[in-house]
Amino acid sequence: MAGPSQRTLARALETLADFPEPSAALEQYLTPPEIAAHICHQTRLQGDLDRWVVDLGTGTGMIAIAATLAGAERVVGIDIDPDALAVARQNAARIDEAGHGTLEWLRGDVTRPPLSLTDATVVSNPPFGAQRGNRHADRDFLETISSIASVSYTIHNEGSQDFVESFATDEGGEVTHGFSAEFPIEKRFEFHTEAEQTLEAEVFRIEWD
């Protein structure tokens, strides 16, 4: 059965709340509704919603909720921040629990995920590693993803293609799709000097062996 269009998904996601007090250390930026909608629209077109969908570092639940709206029956969002998970729960309730599938929220460290899966579809917006103490954070996410996923969709800073492809190859995976995306960021931390800036991001679909 056909699911909602990408545009319909994006419009629904625009109503979701942002982090009330975002953490710079955790690089808590709201995933743009357009990117979340694009990712989850693609997961449906590629037939990747017929298994557990795991949103690592779910934050406010943007991508997890998008996945349920797109038609996933079993979705779990994982985050280390209990305050972010509280917002995610509120966001899900805001749009009728996000859909008709099972949507769960778990608190946990992405490097030690509190679940046992080996054939999941992972959707994730990892930290870009922009903060000094957070270098290579996206690598930590990919290491976990490679152990629990059969396919994944992840958002990275522009210029990450060589790194992502190399990592995937080393772990027996293959990048099958990629697309560029604009990632608008409003001023939220002291080190931001502009009211808003737009980062160029890249999204990759990886099939893991």
Image: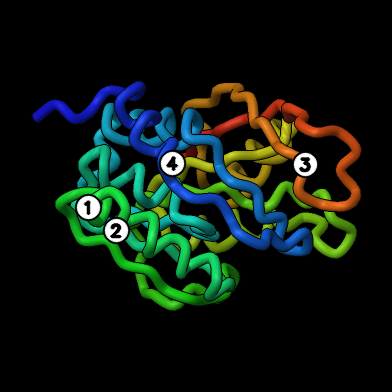
Label 3 secondary element: loop
Q: Residue at x 72, y 47 (%)?
A: 128
Q: Quadrant of the N terminus?
A: top left
Please tell me which residue lies in front, 176 or 17: 17
Q: Is residue 190 left or right of residue 142?
A: right
Residue 86 point in image, percent of width and height: 46, 69
Q: CA distance from mark 2 to mark 3?
A: 27 Å
Q: Which residue is mark 4?
A: 207
Label 1 secondary element: helix
Question: Which amino acid type corresponds to the residue marked 1 in the rendered image?
Answer: Asp
Q: CA distance from mark 3 to mark 4?
A: 35 Å
Q: Residue at x 70, y 36 (%)?
A: 185
Q: Residue at x 32, y 44 (%)?
A: 67
Q: Is residue 105 left or right of residue 5?
A: right
Q: Earlier in the sequence, mark 3 or mark 4?
A: 3
Give the vertical position of 132 relative to 39 (above or below).
Answer: below
Give the vertical position of 13 relative to 53 (above or below).
Answer: above
Q: Which residue is mark 3?
A: 187
Question: Which amino acid type corresponds to the residue marked 4 in the rendered image?
Answer: Glu
Question: Which amino acid type corresponds to the residue marked 2 in the rendered image?
Answer: Ala
The crowding category of the residue bearing disc 1, from other C-alpha atoms within 10 Å (few below 14, some 14 to 19, many at least 20), is few
Q: Which residue is mark 1?
A: 96
Give the vertical position of 132 relative to 175 (above or below).
Answer: below
Q: CA distance from mark 1 to mark 4?
A: 32 Å
